Amino acid sequence: MALDEPEDRVVEIDEEDEWQLYASAGYAAIEPSFEEEEAESKEEEVWFDGDDFDLGGKSVNWDAPPCPAPLGIAHVIKLGVCDHCLSRIGGPRISESPSGSAIRSQAYERDIELSTKVLQDICPLCENLFEDVDNIVDRVFESLSGVEFSTMQFGIHLPKDLVQEEDRIRTKYGAPGSNPLKGSIVEAIHNNIRKLERKVDFVKERPDVMVLVDGLTLRVDVDVRPVFLYGRYRKLSREIPQTRWPCRACRGRSEGCESCNGSGLQYVDSVQDLIGEPVKQALDADDTSFHGMGREDIDVRCLGSGRPFVLEIKRPRKRAYPLSDLVKMVNQNGTSKVEVDTLEWCNKSKINNVKQSRSEKSYTIRFRVGEIGKEADIIEAIQSLSGQTIEQETPKRVSHRRAAKIRKRKLVSIENIQVEDQEVQLTLRCEAGTYVKELVHSDDGRTNPSVQSAIGSNCEVIWLDVEEIHAE
């Protein structure tokens, strides 16, 4: 049927996939750089014969074998590798579960002068990032203060040059199968969180919170994922829209205007807010979005078992709440306007199921006839439309926001035709997308056939109710 309300805004593509670029092993891959390396300055170029390379009086064997060979261990120690990185690239031959400090101690026992040959204090593999793991964990929980969650997806963004250099050194000198930096850092953070005895599961899909750390600045960005509620609402008022309707004068500016008394809304109440506001307050959320299975006009009631919808609650600080209590809050807030029977938690995928449904609907409509004829003739004329397929050109009242085309819709059945003086009331069942008001008054012939053309007299709609949405 036709819609008198503004279109839903285009839903932005969810950025969840983007997080896969920064998450732990299995989420991201290191891509090779095809940029040409800058030519080294001829003045700084040093030639060597493949044996030892002298730097500041300290020598490094660039032809050293990879770890866990003792010469390989000694080589990466000379490069300045920290204990954390020494443990992950050193290999398992030293001990069953070698720690970096144990590997280093055994290397020093083999070469008592090795400790004096270390080239630098900053680890070339991680730039001492492992030392900041405790700091990162503190920042994560500081950012999540007051937020309830039980599952987390954790990602870290590392400088490209660090990732490439780490991969180069680890591939050449690390033990086969050694863990890359990104996954190891994330795992270290996971382990530190587990030590805090926080009941947190680290997941790859549908986390309660998503955390992204910048490995360069240690900035922590937290995304509290929304929760979703499915239900069916009954709209009992003919004076409220389904979703928020921005003020026509100020177009919904936050400060509003005189026309909307500062609310920024054309209508103070909407189905979205009558349902969403108590839920938003109960879950201490930032906002809500409303996703309905179609919508009815402002002056149309929706009865029966109600219209299916999904309420998206954005950035909730509470994620668990008794559903029966939420139902009571909604019904108290929407007294005489909106009511729901049940609510249930659902996933985001439910939105697509609701939006894409093409369910048949039943309506009751009452209209006034210009010149009334015999009751039996009117009933017979209207009944002749039952089972027919009608053609509806885009109604004039929505032509500014609907594509201009002709839609074919089937009238499944027409029942309970009542004639009272100049007024007629009937119940019909039809395909999804049927413009029911236009079916009655024909919209200047843009709907054919119509009730008006069948009875041969002008028709004026008095009211319309959605009796049932046959979605299940």
Image (cartoon, rainbow, N blue to C red):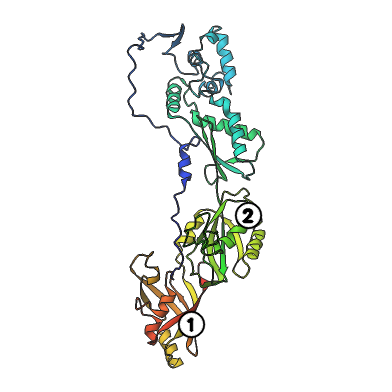
Relative to 333, does residue 362 appear above or below in the rendering? below
Residues marked 2 and 1 touching at CB (< 8 Å): no
Front residue of this view, candidates 336 and 114: 336
Q: Is residue 198 left or right of residue 11?
A: right
Residue 395: tell me if it is visible. Answer: no
Instruction: Please state which of the two labelled residues, at mark 2 or mark 1, is closer to the viewer.
Output: 2
Label disc, if present, on residue 316 of the rendered structure: none
User: In the image, what residue occupies the spot 56% across and 53% down?
Assistant: 287
- Disc 2 residue crowd, few under 14, some 14–19, many 20+, Cα 10 Å: few
In the rendered structure, which amino acid carries the disc numbered 1? Glu
Q: Position of residue 378 (x, y in %)?
A: 43, 89
Residue 224, image quadrant: top right
Name the element at disc 1.
strand
Disc with the residue nearer the chain's start (2 vs 1): 2
- Disc 1 residue crowd, few under 14, some 14–19, many 20+, Cα 10 Å: some
Q: Is residue 396 left or right of residue 472?
A: left
Residue 439, image quadrant: bottom left
Relative to 241, does residue 169 appear above or below in the rendering? above
User: In the image, what residue occupies the spot 50% across and 24% down?
Assistant: 126
Q: Position of residue 342 (x, y in %)?
A: 61, 63
Relative to 110, does residue 95 appear above or below in the rendering? below
User: In the image, what residue occupies the spot 58% across and 24% down?
Assistant: 97
Residue 452: tell me if it is visible. Answer: yes
What residue does disc 1 label? Answer: 415
What residue does disc 2 label? Answer: 281
How many numbered discs sit on the rendered protein? 2
Q: Position of residue 340 (x, y in %)?
A: 60, 65
> Alpha carbon of mark 2 to alpha carbon of mark 1: how far?
44 Å
State the quadrant of the N terminus.
bottom left
Front residue of this view, candidates 170 and 34: 34
Name the element at disc 2.
helix
In the rendered structure, which amino acid carries the disc numbered 2? Gln
